[in-house]
Image (cartoon, rainbow, N blue to C red):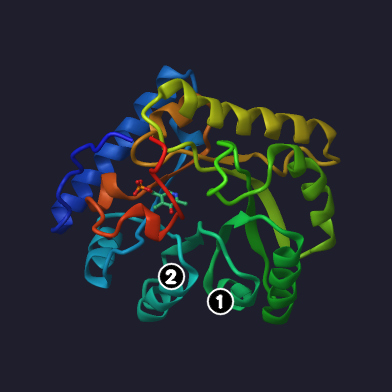
Amino acid sequence: MSTPNYPPAETREDLAKNLQAVQDRISSAAQRAGRSPDEVRLLPVSKTIDEAHIRLAVDAGCRWLGENKVQEAHRKWEAMTDLDEVKWSVIGHLQTNKAKFVARFASEFQALDSLRLAEALDRRLQAEGCGLDVFVQVNTSGEASKYGLEPQEAGRFIAELPAFSSLRVRGLMTLAAFSTDEARVRRCFSTLRTLRDQIRQDAPDPAVLEELSMGMSGDFEWAIDEGATVVRVGQAIFGPRLLPDSYYWPAAGTDS
Ligand SMILES: *Cc1c(COP(=O)(O)O)cnc(C)c1O
């Protein structure tokens, strides 16, 4: 991935400006693709961002916050339960023994990748008496370091999920290859879209599984062109991250 210059994000005005700029880029990308901008939800990703800046971003209009690590997310949620207009989305790999955290506060979980985890989440959600929107994570890049199901496993996996009645399966999620090669990145996105279309054809209720969560700060316009309905954008809103991506993704960036 090239290293773009992400904008500063210190003040409420910075954050409002960045949010508006990303929203404008989403609208333009949707229009170029002949799609309605309303079809694409912006999920601002606030991992590593401290409470003060998150509060500024919420004040500037953020209604969703995406976090990669569940304990970081849970800690922030506990500190900001007064922000009841905000919904939290957990977008990173989850160990089965941490399912209870997600069940407690998240509105959405985007990295479902095993039946053991589905079972653990369902059990916790039943106990809490609530449901959860989930996305099934698919590894579209073929990179061994990436989490997610192989594309050819996804259909059979999704067919098992109705057994877990508190999980509402909304769609598929992927991380594209970390590469500056546009064709290679787009191939990941189009693989996810094709897969969703195939699975919906066989599904008893094609209204479920509508969503495609794909695209981040460096590639969300390509993702929208390929059909994204959710884009997960951190640095273009909150400024450059200090932690290396390898903290969140094992071996990230080693092949770009
Ligand atoms: C951090 C993260 C993003 C956002 O990446 P940016 O480069 O900050 O836009 C998207 N998806 C996942 C799963 C992430 O962990």
**Residue 20 drawn above or below residue 93:** above
Image-quadrant location for residue 247: bottom left
Residue 76's x, y, as percent? 38, 74
Label 1 sits on what residue type?
Phe
How far from the left and from the top, in percent, is residue 128? 67, 80
Q: Is residue 36 visible?
A: no
Q: Does 27 appear above or below 61?
A: above
Residue at coordinates 51% horizontally, 58% vertically from top-left? 92
Callout 1–callout 2 Cβ contact below 8 Å: yes
- Residue 5 vs residue 21, the one in the foreground: 5
- Which residue is at a point 40% across and 32% down the rendered structure image? 179
Amino acid found under the numbered disc labelled 2: Ala
Q: Looking at the rendered structure, which numbered label has been put on residue 13?
A: none
Camera sees residue 100:
yes
The quarter of the picture where the N terminus appears is: top left
Residue 160: image location, x then y, percent: 83, 54
Residue 13 in the figure: left or right of residue 143: left
Q: Secondary structure at mark 1?
A: helix
Q: Residues within 10 Å of mark 1 (few under 14, many from 20)?
A: some
Cα gap from disc 1 to disc 2, whole angstroms: 9 Å
Residue placed at 41% from the left, 23% from the top?
182
Image coords of residue 123 (percent x, y): 75, 75
* Secondary-structure class at tag 2: helix
Q: Residue at x 76, y 30 (%)?
A: 198
Q: Which mark is residue 101?
A: 1
Q: Nearer the viewer, residue 128 or 253?
A: 253
In this rendering, position of residue 31 left or right of residue 103: left
Image side of residue 14 versus residue 190, left or right: left
Task: Tell me: residue 148, above or below residue 92.
Answer: above
Q: Which residue is mark 2?
A: 73
Does the closest atom of ligand 1 sit within 8 Å of the Cβ of label 1? no
